Image: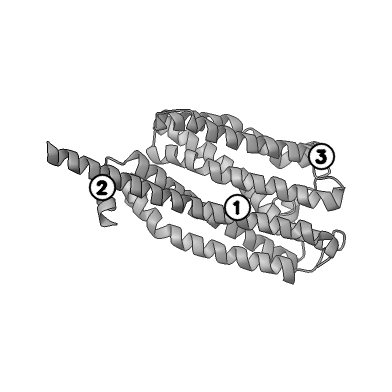
Amino acid sequence: MNWTWFHRLGSPPSFFRFAEALAPWLTALSLLLIAVACYAGLFVAPPDYQQGDAFRIIYVHVPTAAISLSIYVLMALVGAVALIWRMKLAEVAVVAAAPIGASFTAVALVTGMLWGKPMWGAYWVWDARLTSELVLFFLYLGVIALNSAFNDPRAAARACAWLALVGVVNVPIVKYSVEWWNSLHQGATLLSVEAIQKPKMSADMLWPLLMSLAGFYLLFGAALLRRMQNLLLERERRARWVRDWLEAR
Amino acid sequence: MDPRYAVFIWSCYGLTAVVIAWNLLAPRRARNELRQRLSDRADEDAERSDEV
């Protein structure tokens, strides 16, 4: 198999062109999926037999919570690549992913609070799942603050990569907190062996959730590509390809 | 929809919509500002080289 196209993607101008072509499609598809999923979640899915209509919050809470973990794992992986191979695109990806991750973590926390109030009677409890997700939010803020604290963008990206690598230990804590400790929070609905063997949700409740998950992941892809493009333009502003791009505008 | 939960549900969906919009629009705005800044700098550099 010819891997030349993959290696070429490692070069900033090739990646920039690739992202320029892909991002609009990802944006459009993600918005379509999220819109259909939200409509189905609000108006088509039947109410839950225990939680009634309050369960409809699942269609925004679960995808944002899942993606908040996935983004941090991605940051740790590309952070390792940035530290080991000093690849520019990996450095840029760590820095670009943090604000997106922070925003989705904030949504997961707030929607969780708004779901908790009618179900548990309290907006917040110092439960292992909620607390570890809050720690995840602070880790994202830490990466953003660390990036702003350096004048040299490459040094900043390496520091962010270290924090992403160290902080990734919190991800399994968030994921398995409901199994390791007594928790008010319910267990995994989708991502567990039992849930895959025997789904815990009926099909008419499940498909909007899967569609919403797909939509949020694509949205993250689009936002990440756009932020990476901006960082590349800033970093490579003296390069010939950036000047050509500016002249072409 | 059960009116007891409507405020909670719509608040969640509203907040999510705002964050989705922010994630899509903030990079676009940053790109426009960056493009303007880089163009201005390129013009300044061109003027300086003309003077030299």
Q: Is residue B20 above or below residue A109?
A: below
Identify which amino acid the numbered label 1 is placed on.
Val
**Residue found 38% across the figure and 46% down from its top:** B34
* Cα gap from disc 1 to disc 2, whole angstroms: 33 Å
Distance, label 2 to label 3, CA atoms, is: 53 Å
Q: Secondary structure at mark 3?
A: loop
Are there few (<14), some (14-19), or many (20+) residues within 10 Å of tag 3? some
Q: Who's the residue at 51% across and 38% down the image?
A: A77
Label 3 marks which chain's residue? A
In the image, farthest residue toward the bottom: A44
Give the residue pinned by disc 1: B19
Q: Callout 2, which amino acid?
A: Arg
Q: Are marks 1 and 3 on the same chain?
A: no
Residue drawn at x 84%, y 65% as measured from the top left:
B2
Is A229 drawn above or below residue A35 in the view shown? Answer: above
The image quadrant of residue A153 is top left
- Between disc 2 and disc 3, whose residue precedes? 3
Q: Toward the viewer: A98 or A212?
A: A98
Mark 2 = which residue? A243
Label 1 chain ID: B
Chain on which label 2 sits: A
User: Which label sits in the foreground, 1 or 3?
Assistant: 1
Count all numbered tags in the image, as a single digit: 3
Q: Amino acid at mark 3?
A: Val
Question: Percent position (x, y) of residue A85?
Answer: 40, 33
Residue shown at 58% from the left, 29% from the top = A166
Residue A9 appears in view: no
Q: Can residue B30 be seen in this snapshot?
A: yes
Pointer 3 residue: A125
Label 2 secondary element: helix
Q: Nearer the viewer, mark 2 or mark 3?
A: 2
Badge 2 density bin: few <14, some 14–19, many ≥20, Cα 10 Å = some
